[in-house]
Amino acid sequence: MTLPPSLARTPRLDRWLRLDPDGSVAICTGKVEIGQGIKTALAMIAADELDVALYRVRVRTADTALTPNELITAGSLSVEDSGGAIRVACATARAKLLDAAAAVLGVPRDSLDVEDGTVTSSLTNQRTDYWSLPYDDLFSVEIQEPLPLKNPDSYRVVGRPAQRLDLPAKVLGHPAFVHDMSLPDMLHGRLVKPPLPGARLERFPDDFQAPGLVAVVRDGSFVGVVAEREEQAVRAAERLSAQCTWHRAPLSPLPSQMAAHLRENVAASFPVIHGGPVAEPVPPAPEIRGTAKRLSATYTRPFQMHGSIGPSAALAQLESGRLTVYSHSQGVELLKIALADVLGMAEDSVRVVHAEGAGCYGHNGADDVALDAALLARAVTPRPVLTKWTRADEHGFEPYAPATVIEMTASLDDRGQILHWDHQAFGLTHMGRPRPSPGHSNLQSAWWLSSPIPPVPREPLMFPEAGIHRNLQPIYDFPDQRLVKHFVADGPLRTSSTRSLGAFANVFAIESFMDECAGAAGRDPFDFRLAHLRDPRAREVLETLRERAPDPAGGGRGIAMARYKSRQAYVGLLVDVDVLDDARVSLKRALIVADAGLVIDPDGLRNQLEGGFIQAASWALKEQVDWDQNGVASRDWESYPIITFSEIPEIETHLIDRRHEPALGAGEASTGPTPAAIANAIGNAAGVRVRDIPFTAEALRRAAAE
Amino acid sequence: MATTLTVNGKAFTSDADPGTPLIFVLRNDLGLMGAKLGCGAEQCGSCTVLADGEPIHSCTASLESISGRCIETLESLSRDGQPDAIQQAFIDENAAQCGYCTAGIILAAKALLSKRPDPTRAEIVEALNGHLCRCGAHPRIIRAIERAAAARGQTS
């Protein structure tokens, strides 16, 4: 057996856990808490493998100076990556502790039992505990190979709903977010953002004054203010903004031109085979012959936002040539390198410590504001600066989910089975995060400096299940298929990773089109899917969804399913909707069935699956970034509305028990099926096929008129 | 000009500009971090506090506008560090993901439950409809408020 990748990168046991004298266990992870409950899940894994009570486990999340480097918290991989590593590390630690206990007690090791860290010999009834054992060098070892892990049937903590460890502090109002941090002598920073990303600062007041102002920082077209008090920073930034003028290059293309833009500006095309693009010519479309019935349809997704409720923030302090940044970045190690690059500092003089931000799942403004905070802190060294984006900054400058066009074609034989399947995805990059690239930076303000550092050139990602082609591979078995990724390098707006990346658009298209094909074949959507589906776990998800389907709660029902990234959790989704007289869609009920392998925290998993459904339903029904040539028009929650409490349906979630299978990442697994199940339900309720997200009343009326 | 405020039962005099939004004084001068800055425009509810028992947006309410009113923040609910019934219900239901919107929602729930101790689901939804949650914890939040209402009903 080989070590989990995170352990292979950091094999020293004492980098992963430590016994503290107060009877607790400190676990270190390179992953971060983004509301997904990873602290709790990792603590549960550690508690079981070590045989200690859950309350004894404390989890320290990513800090470039302290924790193992686990690259990035993304792709629904934290339980698999960090959980896998911590499980092996804790099993190793337990073995070391039992060796030490056997030596101390003078009994054979196999006579020892552990109960909440207390070690008892069944031969002599002697006992000791983990914290009383000689500990000094016990964990100063490199893990060479994994020890046998516990049988999941013996788990006491894993598999049972847990209370979130981080929640009491948040509910009681204790400081919990980077926004809440306070250091001695701390100042407050705000930015003066350009009207649109490409604008150049033309006129800037030389003698700007404002109450409490400590510094005005201008470097090229980057402008920020630092003030003693937060409201002074807010007001100074507003007033300074009013005195700046900008040269702006008009944004183009415009929203109405986006679909054509994506089709007509393909930089590279690749066939997708076994989930990955291949650097080969794209084969011709399947030839449809004889009596086969031909169908085709085009599906679109607009630019959409992460839309964190708390605008991005960071706390930075430059002291004696060393920079410390507290950030809610999902990739603190990559951010550290990116900050050092832009600031011209050595990497080892930059430390990035994760501190929580508001949730969204993806690459929002977290990394960008970290650079902003550092640029402001540099001007007032050694005082720390807490810098926050405004709501308008976040809406206008976060990297969006890329606009996407999907073209589907299929043919059906006389029995109503699919013969040919053709899926082409046209899209912009999903990879806008900071990453090392000499002479380039993906931190936005770096582009605006007087010595600008341009963005990392956008190139197609070629590894399996990456951005545009994530879940482009259908879960179904078709006799003949062609899957194509069309990479578009340039668009009007910056784009990056948003929950589930390309899976949202691809599964929307696949599962909508499966319903359209089922309709053309005159077959039931469940039967039609099952007739093309061999994967037994996928079949069980679909069959369970059908068995558990409640009486209809609305005028139409839709289903959809997917296996996230073709190798993580399976989700089947059923949605009931009403289409109201004014063509608005009302969600009535959702049933989620999931197979995520071994479930660590069933309640946490439900929370993720249901939250993923709700966020995706909001994208599906309501959200699109609007802009004109002067900039992004969606700058607040009125111009960019998201789902509200009154629009949330009844949701039921059923988890399939697979405790002897590996745990599968599930944080993004319900996202893809959601728009398709809703579209299929609308089709069923109103006889209208919606293929363009969002499914607003206007979109339904437009689709009905076609 | 100084403004006198009553926050969580204690009088406090602020020297900040009377036009200063309340949230900055609560967070930065009083160290009360419950209220969160979200939009600055009364659109998301994350900054909600209570003024004389009614929910207000502390991101836009100026000091002078609330002078003389009794302000309650999230921190006023717990006693000796122990959560009250509403806070406990949120813990028990794991009624959050990131938790950024939670403080404002708990205060909206408190205002609702003080008027309607046994609210219907529709009344809960109506009380929360000005609060945005991006993580999709809505169903749990509604359950937590129902649970809190039931718990308070048992103890009163």
Image (cartoon, rainbow, N blue to C red):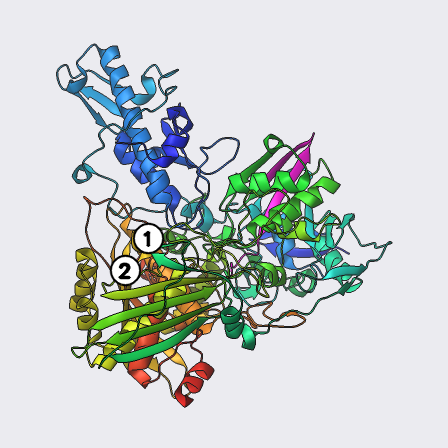
Image quarter where the N terminus of chain A lies is top left
Q: Name the residue under label 2.
A: A571
Q: Is disc 2 in the same subunit as disc 1? A: yes
Secondary structure category for the residue under label 1: loop
Q: Residue at x 41, y 63 (%)?
A: A615
Q: Is residue A595 visible?
A: yes
Give the answer, above or below, for where A511 lies relative to A432.
Answer: below
User: Magenta stretch?
Assistant: A307-325
Q: Residue at x 28, y 30 (%)?
A: A50
Tell me where residue A611 appears, x and y as whole percent: 37, 60
Local crowd size for mark 2, using a 10 Å CA cut-off: few (<14), some (14–19), many (≥20): many
Q: Which mark is residue A666?
A: 1
Tell me where residue A430 appears, x and y as whole percent: 48, 57
Say whether residue A315 is magenta. yes
Q: Is residue B145 visible?
A: no
Viewer-nearest residue: A639 or A57: A639
Chain letter, disc 1 residue: A
